[in-house]
Image (cartoon, rainbow, N blue to C red):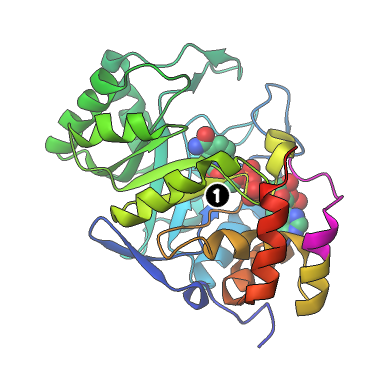
Amino acid sequence: MTSQTITAAASGTWKLGDMEINRIGFGAMRLTQTGEALTAGATPRDRGQAVSVLRRAVELGVNHIDTAAFYFSPLRSANELINRALAPYPDDLVIATKVGPGRDPSGEWLPHATPERLRGQVEENLRQLGRDHLDVVNLRIVGTGSIAERFGALAELRDAGLIRHLGISNVTPGHLAEAQSIAPVACVQNMYGIGVRPDQDEFVRACGEQGIAFVPFYAIAGAGRTAGTTGADDEEVLAVARAHGMSAAQVRLAWTLHRGPHVLAIPGTGDPDHLAANVAAGALRLSEDDLALLDSLHRRPR
Ligand SMILES: NC(=O)c1ccc[n+]([C@@H]2O[C@H](COP(=O)([O-])OP(=O)(O)OC[C@H]3O[C@@H](n4cnc5c(N)ncnc54)[C@H](OP(=O)(O)O)[C@@H]3O)[C@@H](O)[C@H]2O)c1
């Protein structure tokens, strides 16, 4: 099978709340611009290319898309591109969004939402996506303070039927425990990958033990964060990639999927070839030797 014919089903499935999804999904943050994401003066990506990448993702079996209302460039909004490309939405498509952060219309960051303002952010996502409920809403936070009031506000919106499942993002195990005392948590979305936050290994395992999905972001971009990949990669990753005839990005994605059946991938790209490669990474089975080499890189002090 070529990378053009491998579908997201090759990565296996996970039940996110009551919704079964393929473990290889798609992150929408890169769709709205070329170059660095989340900057006020970003260069808008070609609309047709963004729409065709989304449609191709679904054709390739992707049924988990991560987005946010604050993913936009001067002329493109990720939610509106998803709506344009995919509505009426397939029944099995799970769209996960994030609330908490916000940007003003010119793209400058606003203070994080208070509990009272979260409803407006949820409604903004509903409006842009053209839905009457959101499948998954992650509360995305900064810092170590309590999330009880904000998560409680989202739990009320869940009870009101606006949200089906709740998640939390950029959080600690303490935040997870706090959230779980308020309402069920379907997923944790944190930064994680080879050599990226190895201190989270135990948290990743703990989520799996509790049946909670762990959804890493920047699994490919790593330290490049919003700027994306740098092009250079570590020798260990390149060696494993060569041995399998795959790319470094594919090895990085496959490694995250090998951390446990509850780990889901949401690679972001606006490039159709990268999309197909990322979906194909779900079929890559790493050997014990591959994993030992990559794990040693992961744990190496930086
Ligand atoms: N919760 C949070 O706080 C948070 C924060 C950041 C992101 N996210 C979510 O996580 C998703 C993933 O993060 P991300 O999109 O920044 O990072 P990523 O998937 O780790 O990496 C994206 C970068 O890698 C490149 N890339 C993707 N596939 C590739 C391939 N097969 N070969 C070579 N290069 C490849 C992309 O460039 P090309 O466009 O050229 O392919 C881009 O530079 C986002 O889209 C977003 O939905 C969540």
Can residue 128 be seen in this snapshot? no
Observer-nearest residue: 47 or 261?
261
> What residue did someone put label 1 on?
27
**82 versus 294 height, above or below:** above
Q: Residue at x 69, y 73 (%)?
A: 289
Q: Position of residue 189 (x, y in %)?
A: 45, 42
Q: Quadrant of residue 178?
A: top left
Which quarter of the figure is the N terminus placed in? bottom right
Q: Is residue 181 magenta?
A: no
Observer-nearest residue: 138 or 57?
138
Disc tally is 1
Mark 1 C-beta closer than 8 Å to ligand 1:
yes
**52 versus 228 height, above or below:** below
- In the displayed structure, does residue 35 sit left or right of residue 132? right
Residue closest to the far left: 159
Which quarter of the figure is the C terminus placed in? top right
Q: Which residues are magenta?
A: 228-238
Q: Residue at x 53, y 15 (%)?
A: 104
**149 versus 175 height, above or below:** above
Q: Quadrant of residue 286?
A: bottom right
Can residue 185 be seen in this snapshot? yes
Q: Amino acid at mark 1?
A: Gly
Q: Residue at x 77, y 46 (%)?
A: 229
- In the displayed structure, does residue 16 sit left or right of residue 11? left
